[in-house]
Image (spheres, grey):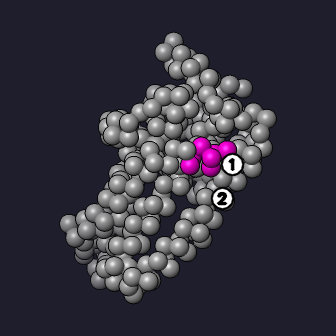
């Protein structure tokens, strides 16, 4: 516990961007973009290679996944649909696990930059790999709870999602276990729910527009220039831009990390 307090105390000497107590959403968003641009090379060095692997390698793994629902219902069309769904879920899980390494490493690089320190991207990737198993366990627990909340009713799912929104930082930066990472996040959000909710919704809208309109528009137009839909050049260019687009998730991480740190102080 003493070690954890020391870490937090050191981080309180952070640059002003990460002390947003009196700053509104748009001010914090602007500063997050500035900080992101300053550390863009380090973030890109981590994120781009990992998601190039996801975009190019993971789809080829589908040929090694058998038709797991073959003969399950006795109806070929239903069995084929179930096999496709299972295959897609497995591929999505593999992609998420590989991507987890990048997000752990990115969080560590950004957090160290806040303290005026530097972690080489390669070292951050090694740390991400070592921390991955419990990260996956915590992620599964988080999404399972949120999904159950949405199944019961939309509102409970959204509320639970907001209360546990800081689970990544709680685990990666504070060393919390799967359950304690969720409860640590809940304790931070308690009493600040409206503030956290508005900021989370705001950054979600910004990232949605950036990813699905700006980056997607640029990627699709460039891809069309090099080949027709589903052609190899088109798929390659589209995959590259998809990986590049993941880099901008750094803005969301910086934004939420600044909010996380401020809640710890309050």
Tell whether position 33 is magenta.
yes
Left or right of 177: which side holds 164?
Answer: right
Residue at x 70%, y 54% (from the top left corner): 202
Percent of width and height locating residue 74? 28, 79
Residue at x 43%, y 78% (from the top left corner): 223
Residue at x 45%, y 83% (from the top left corner): 224
Compared with 158, 7 (above or below) is above
Residue at x 75%, y 50% (from the top left corner): 26
Q: Secondary structure at mark 2?
A: helix
- Crowdedness near tag 2: few (<14), some (14–19) or many (≥20) residues, C-alpha within 10 Å: few
- State the residue in front, 169 or 225: 225
Q: Secondary structure at mark 1?
A: helix
- State the residue in front, 200 or 249: 249
Q: Residue furthest top?
A: 2
* Residue 160 appears in the figure: no
- The C terminus sits in image quarter: top right
Tell whether position 9 is magenta.
no
Stretch in magenta:
29-37
Q: Earlier in the sequence, mark 2 or mark 1?
A: 1
Q: What predominant SS class does the magenta segment belong to?
A: helix
- Crowdedness near tag 1: few (<14), some (14–19) or many (≥20) residues, C-alpha within 10 Å: many
Percent of width and height locating residue 176? 48, 28
Q: Quadrant of residue 127?
A: top left
- Point out which mark residue 29 bears: 1
Q: Marks 2 and 1, how far apart in space?
A: 9 Å
Q: Quadrant of residue 38?
A: top right
For label 2, the residue is 206
- State the residue in front, 263 or 116: 116
Labelled pair 2, 1 in contact (Cβ < 8 Å) = yes
């Amino acid at each position: 516990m003493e070690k954890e307090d020391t870490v937090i105390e050191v981080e309180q000497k952070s640059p002003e961007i990460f002390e947003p107590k009196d700053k509104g959403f748009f001010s914090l968003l602007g500063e997050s973009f500035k900080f992101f641009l300053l550390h863009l090379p380090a973030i890109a060095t981590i994120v781009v290679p990992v998601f190039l692997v996801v975009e190019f390698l993971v789809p080829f793994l589908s040929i090694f996944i058998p038709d797991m629902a073959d003969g399950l219902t006795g109806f070929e069309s239903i069995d084929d649909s179930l096999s496709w769904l299972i295959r897609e879920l497995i591929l999505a899980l593999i992609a998420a696990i590989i991507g987890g390494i990048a997000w752990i490493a990115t969080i560590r690089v950004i957090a160290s930059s806040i303290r005026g320190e530097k972690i080489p991207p390669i070292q951050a990737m090694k740390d991400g790999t070592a921390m991955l198993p419990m990260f996956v366990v915590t992620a599964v627990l988080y999404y399972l709870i949120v999904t159950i909340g949405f199944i019961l009713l939309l509102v409970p799912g959204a509320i639970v999602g907001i209360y546990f929104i800081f689970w990544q930082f709680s685990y990666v930066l504070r060393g919390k276990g799967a359950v304690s990472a969720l409860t640590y996040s809940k304790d931070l959000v308690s009493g600040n729910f409206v503030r956290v909710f508005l900021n989370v919704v705001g950054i979600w809208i910004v990232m949605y527009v950036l990813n699905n309109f700006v980056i997607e528009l640029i990627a699709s137009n460039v891809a069309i220039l090099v080949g027709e839909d589903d052609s190899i050049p088109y798929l390659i260019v589209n995959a590259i831009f998809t990986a590049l687009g993941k880099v901008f998730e750094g803005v969301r991480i910086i934004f939420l990390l600044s909010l996380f740190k401020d809640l710890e102080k309050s």
